[in-house]
Amino acid sequence: MTAPARRTQAERREGTMTAVVDAAVEVLGEVGYARATTAEIARRAGVSQGGLFRHFGARLDVMLAAADRIRSRQLVDFSEGLGSLDGTDLTEVVHRLRRATRAPINAAWYELVLAARADAELRAVLEPLAERYHGEILALGRALPIAERLAPVELDTIVLSIVHLLDGEALMASLLPHPEHEDVRVEQLVRILSGRPLY
């Protein structure tokens, strides 16, 4: 029986970094930014704090890597969802966006965004990534069939307005849910996008 091949140093390094980033996303979503300590992240990743800091210079670097992981996962999931749509099913597009904003991984993103409001250092490193994220979301929106009917600035404004509305809905749902309004809200959005009167 042949012994399994030993991992290279680069593979071990990549494995450790992946474990740390995944643990950071998990901790952010479960206990929030303030309590997402490097000690807790390292514990969940199965590494020592020294091991964590061999790969990340500071807690801020771990947070930025976690934010980028969230961005890439959400975009993959959403682009795959849009790719499976036939024609212009706006209701399904809005529902897919809502599911993306309600995904557990997105709670970690909200934690980072809210913390950045009062943390200038975090805001400085998160802002370029958030700008990239929005650019990628807009690119997905421009690939929808509805894009042909709208000027680019109008389409971009609509896409971001829907994302922001659903982000706000997801945040408030954790404190004061109003499920009776949610389907009505989707219907209203679709009516507006379709150019139909609300009632």
Image (cartoon, rainbow, N blue to C red):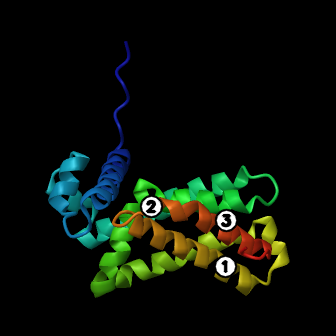
Residue 17 at least partly seen: yes
What residue does disc 1 label?
158
Crowding at dot 3, Cα within 10 Å, few <14 / some 14-19 / many 20+, comes out as some
- Residue 131, image x, y percentages: 52, 80
Q: Secondary structure at mark 2?
A: helix
Mark nearest the camera among 3 and 2 is 3
Q: Earlier in the sequence, mark 1 or mark 3?
A: 1
* Residue ID for mark 3: 187
Contact (Cβ within 8 Å) of mark 2 with mark 1: no
Percent across and percent down for residue 58 are 23, 70
Numbered label attached to residue 70: 2
For numbered disc 1, what is the local secondary structure?
A: helix
Does 49 sit left or right of 194 as displayed? left
Amino acid type at mark 1:
Ile
Callout 3: SS: helix
Residue 39, how many percent across, how many down? 15, 58
Residue furthest to the top in view is 1
Q: Does residue 58 appear in the picture of this structure? A: no
Above or below, 8 against 67 in this view is: above
> Measured along the vertical axis of the image, is residue 67 above or below residue 1?
below
Q: Amino acid at mark 2?
A: Ile
Q: Residue at x 34, y 21 (%)?
A: 3
Residue 91, quarter of the rendered image: bottom right
Callout 3 amino acid: Glu
Quarter containing the C terminus: bottom right
Q: Nearer the viewer, residue 147 or 161?
A: 161
